[in-house]
């Protein structure tokens, strides 16, 4: 993740937004890509001020909604053949067992699988194609897809952004205090461990069974 964040920091903000939209959009169509890693990395980048958190959240939400919608129509037109091809191309991520598990989730939870599926790696990839193949009404799918996409993208961006800003301020203001606490904690831990290490040999003979002494022989 740190490598992705560092790489994103070398490109212009508009390119970050477009790249984030593309990665999450393609992932939502049914192609395994690190969409969540890209979102978290871009959110951390926003915490440094390199890009706008609003731009990150809007780009991620747009990618999720557009990608899922395209995936829906692919699944609706292609049916099982789509999943067969995906399983052959990506057997590790989208094998028959994982597709069957995703389908069971849809049969059990219906439209809620679309909304909350945005937070689950497998369903984040397969929600659109599976909903389309199961002929879920598009308006229901779109409402759940949009709601889940906005909640996932906006919530993730906000949490990572504010945590990153708070951590940056805290470390900036209290870096020496933090260093002192770490050093003090290390010294105390070393003293405790040393004391216990010395006490163990002294305590061990008390737990060892003592053999009865043979009576002394008299001359």
Image (cartoon, rainbow, N blue to C red):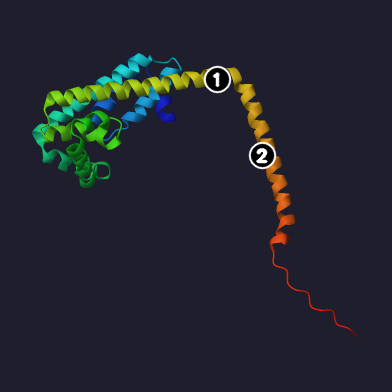
SS at badge 2: helix
Q: Check disc 1: other Cα within 10 Å, few if <14, some if 14-19, many if 20+.
A: few
Q: Nearer the viewer, residue 18 or 66?
A: 66
Q: Check disc 2: other Cα within 10 Å, few if <14, some if 14-19, many if 20+.
A: few
Whether residue 110 is visible, yes or no, is: yes
Q: Are marks 2 and 1 in contact (CB under 8 Å)?
A: no
Q: Is residue 29 shown left or right of residue 167? A: left
Q: CA distance from mark 2 to mark 1?
A: 25 Å
* Residue marked by disc 1: 170
Residue at the spot 69% in from the left edge and 36% down from the top edge: 187
Residue at the spot 47% in from the left edge and 18% down from the top edge: 165
* Residue marked by disc 2: 189
Query: What quarter of the picture does the N terminus occupy?
Result: top left
Residue at the spot 41% in from the left edge and 23% down from the top edge: 160
Q: Position of residue 158 (x, y in %)?
A: 38, 19
Residue closest to the far right: 219
Q: Nearer the viewer, residue 122 or 31?
A: 122
């Amino acid at each position: 993740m740190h490598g992705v964040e560092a790489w994103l920091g070398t490109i212009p903000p508009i390119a970050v937004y477009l790249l984030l939209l593309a990665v999450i959009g393609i992932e939502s169509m049914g192609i395994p890509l690190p969409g969540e890693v890209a979102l978290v990395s871009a959110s951390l980048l926003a915490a440094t001020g390199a890009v706008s958190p609003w731009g990150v959240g809007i780009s991620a939400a747009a990618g999720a909604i557009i990608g899922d919608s395209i995936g829906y129509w692919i699944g609706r037109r292609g049916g099982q053949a789509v999943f067969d091809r995906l399983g052959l191309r990506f057997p590790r991520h989208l094998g028959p067992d994982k597709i069957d598990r995703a389908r069971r989730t849809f049969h059990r939870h219906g439209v809620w699988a679309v909304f909350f599926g945005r937070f689950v790696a497998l369903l984040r990839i397969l929600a659109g194609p599976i909903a389309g193949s199961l002929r879920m009404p598009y308006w229901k799918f779109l409402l759940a897809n949009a709601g889940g996409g906005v909640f996932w993208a906006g919530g993730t961006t906000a949490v990572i952004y504010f945590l990153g800003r708070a951590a940056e301020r805290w470390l900036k203001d209290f870096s020496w205090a933090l260093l002192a606490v770490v050093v003090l904690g290390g010294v105390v831990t070393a003293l405790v461990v040393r004391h216990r290490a010395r006490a163990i040999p002294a305590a061990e003979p008390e737990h060892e069974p003592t053999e009865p002494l043979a009576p002394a022989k008299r001359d």
